[in-house]
Amino acid sequence: MSRTLIAAALALTTLTAPAFAATSTFRMEVDVVRANLATPAGAEKEYDSLKQQVAERCDAEFEDLKYGRSFAIGSCNERTLSNAVRAIGNANLTEVHANRD
């Protein structure tokens, strides 16, 4: 039983290693209408737009990755979206991000 689990863990590690190796930092400009961030509803709208922009960029960053692509994109989306919200530094946007599903 333990040999099977070890083999499965090694296989998983082998498949996800390229995803970890492919993670990189990149600079990204985003389009945000600052006036919309004045209200919670506007911040939610801008958050949805920001989320879409990040998803498109992360998808493009890992376009050629064969193994672990889904994991790499998910990780990229989470990290990049959090960094973008922090960089924008708006309380309403930060609250929307903190309360996301």
Image: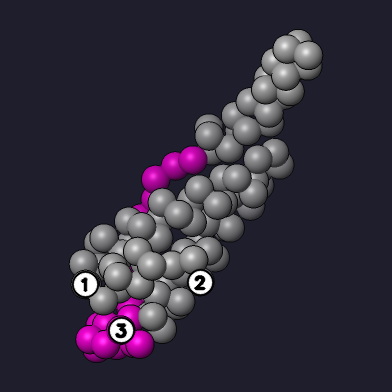
Relative to the observer, which residue lies in front, 3 or 25?
3
Extreme top residue here? Answer: 3
Distance in Å between CA atoms under marks 1 and 3: 9 Å
Whether residue 78 appears in magenta in the rendering, the answer is no
Q: Earlier in the sequence, mark 3 or mark 2?
A: 3
Q: Residue at x 53, y 32 (%)?
A: 21
Q: Earlier in the sequence, mark 1 or mark 3?
A: 3
Q: Residue at x 70, y 15 (%)?
A: 6
Amino acid under disc 1: Ala
Q: Is residue 36 above or below residue 96?
A: below
Q: Is residue 47 above or below residue 2?
A: below
Whether residue 41 appears in magenta in the rendering, the answer is yes
Q: Is residue 74 left or right of residue 51?
A: right
Relative to the observer, which residue lies in front, 87 or 92?
92
Q: Which residues are magenta?
A: 23-43
Mark 2 surroundings within 10 Å by alpha-carbon count, few (fewer than 14), some (14 through 19), many (20 or more): some
* Residue located beneath label 1 in the image: 91
Relative to the observer, which residue lies in front, 27 or 74?
74
Distance in Å between CA atoms under marks 2 and 1: 20 Å
Give residue 94's position: percent from left, percent from top.
Answer: 28, 68
Give residue 27's position: percent from left, percent from top.
Answer: 35, 55
At mark 2, the secondary structure is helix
Give residue 52's position: percent from left, percent from top.
Answer: 51, 71
Residue 40, numbered label? 3
Amino acid under disc 2: Gln
Amino acid under disc 3: Pro
Mark 1 surroundings within 10 Å by alpha-carbon count, few (fewer than 14), some (14 through 19), many (20 or more): some
Give residue 78's position: percent from left, percent from top.
Answer: 45, 54
Distance in Å between CA atoms under marks 3 and 2: 18 Å
* Residue located beneath label 2 in the image: 52
